[in-house]
Amino acid sequence: MSLKITTEMIKELRDSTGISVMQCKRALEEAEGDMNKALAILKKTSSDIALKKGNREVKDGAVNITMAGKKAVIVSLHCETDFVSRNEDFTTLLTKLGDIALTDGKDAMKERAKDMINAIIQKTGENIQLGEVYEVSGDILGGYVHNNKSGVVVSLSGGNAELAREIAMHITAMKPEYITDADIGEDAKKTMLEIFEKEIAQIDKPEEIKKKMLTGKITTYFKEKTLLEQPFIKDGDLTVGKLLQKMGAKIKEVKRYSI
């Protein structure tokens, strides 16, 4: 025998799922008042909707950093529009995914993410996909998120959490491609050498001067792209490398992700 569908039942289902009143009512009617069946129906509906939207391009989204103790997690969530990336359900989902990854690990979070995401797809009507997830461990951690679109976590040996955060902030602003000179690959050096050689070949100068110009251009180019060689954004008289040296710190690891 089916149960009478009451306002209280609809409210309970809505509170537990966040899905619209009409969808909850329809699910309860189909389930003949059985709450567990209604939840299963809504879950299947969410999955079906997500499947239909799965091929739609996700060009926007948001990045979140969650930190506690000696662990930090970067989680990115992609959607179709900036409007949905600022939607409360979307941002709450992103925060929850970060919390799960921090406490239970990223693999456990990924297992649970699909059903959680499908429910928000059903509410927003947009394709939503889990993006990159990074875990960083260390004694001294600092993180910074810029405009919800770019996140950086820095792990230091020495220094303090505030320094790690300021280095993370610098990285989001200056976007270095390398941490140290040692990170610059031979292919990158060769490519830039060829580019600058073509530029200098057009200049009417003696070969000796052109060689010096070439060396200067390559050195300047890679200094601008290397974190430890960049002037620190809060004090242009110090490079990031000199700042770290002054604070008795070294970079152990950097993780970053941008939408």
Image (spheres, grey):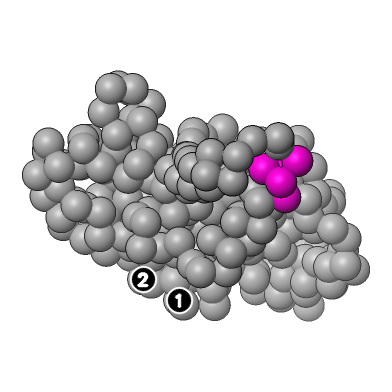
- Callout 2: few (<14), some (14-19), or many (20+) C-alpha neighbours within 10 Å? few
Q: Nearer the viewer, residue 209 or 5?
A: 209
Q: Nearer the viewer, residue 140 or 64?
A: 140
Q: Position of residue 185 (x, y in %)?
A: 49, 67
Q: Residue at x 12, y 36 (%)?
A: 246
Whether the magenta-drawn stretch holds residue 75 is answered as no
Q: Nearer the viewer, residue 198 or 69?
A: 198
In the visual, does 167 lie left or right of 38?
left
Q: Which residue is identified by label 2? A: 104
Q: Residue at x 15, y 42 (%)?
A: 245
Q: Which residue is identified by label 1? A: 108
Can residue 9 be seen from the camera position used here? no
Q: Residue at x 61, y 55 (%)?
A: 192
Q: Position of residue 151 (x, y in %)?
A: 48, 46
Q: Is residue 238 above or below residue 97?
A: above
Per the image, label 2 sits on a secondary structure element best described as: helix
Dot 2 and dot 1 residues touching (CB under 8 Å): yes
In the visual, does 144 lie left or right of 132?
left
Count of numbered circles on the image: 2
Whether the magenta-drawn stretch holds residue 200 is answered as yes
- Callout 1: few (<14), some (14-19), or many (20+) C-alpha neighbours within 10 Å? few
Can residue 182 be seen from the camera position used here? yes
- Residue 237, by quadrant, is top left
Q: Is residue 172 above or below residue 235?
A: below
| Residue 155, label in figure | none
Q: Position of residue 180 (x, y in %)?
A: 35, 55
Give the CA separation, mark 2 to mark 1.
6 Å
**Where does the magenta region start and end?**
198-202
Q: Position of residue 224 (x, y in %)?
A: 47, 40
